[in-house]
Image (cartoon, grey):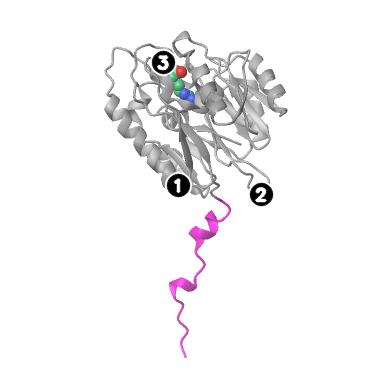
Amino acid sequence: MSLTIEPSDLPDTTTRRDSARVASHRTILMCRPEHFTVSYKINPWMDPAKPTDTSLALAQWQTLYDTYVGLGFDVELIDPEAGLPDMVYAANGGFVLDGIAYGARFTYPERQAEGPAYMRWFASAGFEVAEPVETNEGEGDFLLVGDVILAGTGFRTDSSSHDEVARVFGREVVSLTLVNPSFYHLDTAIAVLDPEPVDGRHTIAYLESAFDDASLAILRQRFPDAILVSEEDAAILGLNSYSDGYNVVIAARATGFERQLRERGYNPVGVDLSELLLGGGGVKCCTLELRR
Ligand code: ARG
């Protein structure tokens, strides 16, 4: 009698390798880019002389929105306001944790009216609003990793706001200094891949050259098994991605990062936001996490 092994009897290595990765439900806030354009320059990506296509920005943003809905996320929307072309980058609107929304206080006058606009939304959505005294650009520079808040400074968010955040949320805050003006927000240089710990740990991905030596030492010590992303992928804001613990929504052109994510058992989902890149933002910039 011969023994035949059906393919279905073999262990499915793909499933097995991925089984440690679990998608968790996410609730986020987004802002439709109805008024998106580049009319001023506050980062190296922006060039007001270059034309922008608002309808293309809207179509690309819609694909991101549909991708999130398809992943089962709850996506809430804030009304865009005329005269605030950068309002689409919702990540900068605040930092929300434990039902408290710490408001943003923008560095440049061009964006300052966004702070109160987002705070009004947080209040109407039932969040306790913590009004900021110090300059900070919300989740652009504050990233939650487990119980710890990684906090960026160097270009936008003032390090005095790191202390303010520590007081508001009663959490450990780790300050990191950015040194490359193209990676002016922490979320352009670090991607948090695990909203929940996996085997007690959190995987992050980052661009080494975006940080000063002291910050790099902290990152290496805290995250020895981090994914180190290439300059090429970072240069199209590949790190500016959003993960539910399994699915990682990334810039479609970041093919090296895509491969690294697959090797670690994640499921990268590529989205093209070329138009919003003209403003210096990508996937994560358009996404603000709401933690109630
Ligand atoms: N034009 C915007 C600015 O320079 C882009 C913000 C990108 N947002 C982010 N979370 N990185 O402020």
Q: Is mark 1 within 8 Å of ligand 1?
A: no
| Disc ID at residue 199 | 2
Question: Left or right: where does residue 249 sit relative to residue 191?
Answer: left
Tell which quarter ligand 1 is in: top left
Crowding at mark 2 (Cα within 10 Å: few <14, some 14-19, many 20+): few
**On residue 71, which mark appears?**
1
Work out whether mark 1 precedes mark 3 in sequence or the reverse, and give the earlier one: 3
Secondary structure at badge 2 equals loop
Seen in the picture, residue 259 relative to 49 is either above or below; the reply is below
Q: Earlier in the sequence, mark 2 or mark 3?
A: 3
Residue 26, visible in the rendered structure? yes
Give coordinates of residue 73: x percent, y percent: 48, 43
User: What residue sits 48% from the left and 17% below the top?
Assistant: 114
Give the extent of the magenta segment.
1-22
x and y, in percent, of residue 157 in the image: 57, 16
- Secondary structure under the numbered disc 3 in the rendered image: loop
Q: Residue tagged by mark 3?
A: 44
Report the amino acid beneath label 3. Answer: Pro
Q: Nearer the viewer, residue 112 or 278?
A: 112
Amino acid on which the number 1 mark rests in the picture: Leu
Seen from the viewer's position, the closer of residues 247 and 207 is: 247
